[in-house]
Amino acid sequence: MINWLHAPLSPEITRYVECYWFIEKRPGVEGHAFPKLNPDPSAHLVLSPPTQRYRYETEQRVFEGEGSHWLFPHLHTSELDHRAPFVHIGIKFHAGALYSLTLPEYVHPTLDVITPVTLSSVMEHVSDAEDMLITLARNSPTQTCEQLDALLLPWLKKSREDQHSEVTRKALQLLDTMSVSALGDTLYCSQRTLERSFSRVTGLTLKQCQSMNKLEAMLAYLYQREATEIDWSDVALKFGFSDQPHLIRHLKKQIGLTPNTYTKERSLTIDVYGGVKYS
């Protein structure tokens, strides 16, 4: 298994893109056949070979197709089909970034949906570049980031900001450091105004986004520990849950697993493919 994750190199890109990631399962490599993808407030542009199939299954529906696709922000856990070899390059956008970016045939906000995409609809004067980028990603993550920066820049320069996107960006910077109820006063606006702007830009409530961010941080923490090291009472305290039953309800709602089941299965993508970090 090969994987990496890097932040963009250009400050103009980092305003909208959180990171680039790469993952490949080569022939003959054993792995979890059906890993689970946890909820995420961010959109991902997933670049794949044109004939490579993808499949995402939730309790509500199944999304299947071939090639590159948009993985829009999702509130529900998806099960992936990774029985066959595969390779992906991912572009992870900041929560709410697509509000300021023009996309053809896109209605904002779109949630819990996966749709096929061609690179030429996003990147100017580009078509069928997936194979070139994948070959580059296998050999040089830094050059891949440089190339993606260059390809995305003309599109991102056309972004349009307004008061809703500005206040949402500020709220996102503070969301993991304070209570939702304190954000309005901190940003010098009413809580109702903040909630409306945040929902307009991200399609989510502040609480929903905060819960997903907390889940991601908790999964990264758990990934670094063996099952025998995990004390769920300590985990509940560390991540701000009132008690262990509160944590159990949260995990069950977010990923459909109780702590004991999660510990046994370790079937989320972070457990299957590793806790890659920015570099």
Image (cartoon, rainbow, N blue to C red):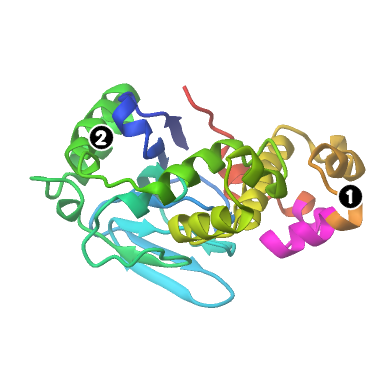
Q: Residues within 10 Å of mark 1 (few under 14, many from 20)?
A: few
Residue at horizontal 36%, vertical 46%? 88
Which residue sits at x=44%, y=34%? Answer: 2
Quarter of the image where one finds residue 12: top left
> Considering depth in this image, is 269 or 245 the residue closer to the camera?
245
218 to the left or right of 198: right
- The x and y percentages for residue 157 are 21, 38
Measured Cα–Cα span from mark 1 to mark 2 = 43 Å
Apparent side of residue 146 relative to residue 276 in the rendered image (left or right): left
Give yes or no for residue 10 being in the magenta stretch: no
Q: Nearer the viewer, residue 153 or 201?
A: 201
Badge number at residue 117 = none
Question: Which residue, given by chain and number where applicable, does mark 1 sit on?
Answer: 242
In the picture provided, is 84 more to the left or to the right than 184? left
For the residue pair 269 and 179, the one nearer the viewer reads as: 179
Check the image and name the residue furthest to the left.
125
What percent of the width, then of the height, locates residue 152?
Answer: 23, 39
Q: Quadrant of the rendered structure where residue 10 is?
A: top left
Tag 1 secondary structure:
loop
> For the residue marked with disc 1, what is the amino acid?
Ser
The location of residue 223, given as percent across then percent down, is 69, 38
Q: Which residues are magenta?
A: 247-262
At label 2, which amino acid type do we have? Answer: Leu
Which is more toward the observer, 223 or 208? 208
Q: Label 2: which residue?
A: 148
Q: SS at mark 2? A: helix
Q: Main secondary structure of the magenta part?
A: helix
Q: Is residue 182 left or right of residue 54?
A: right
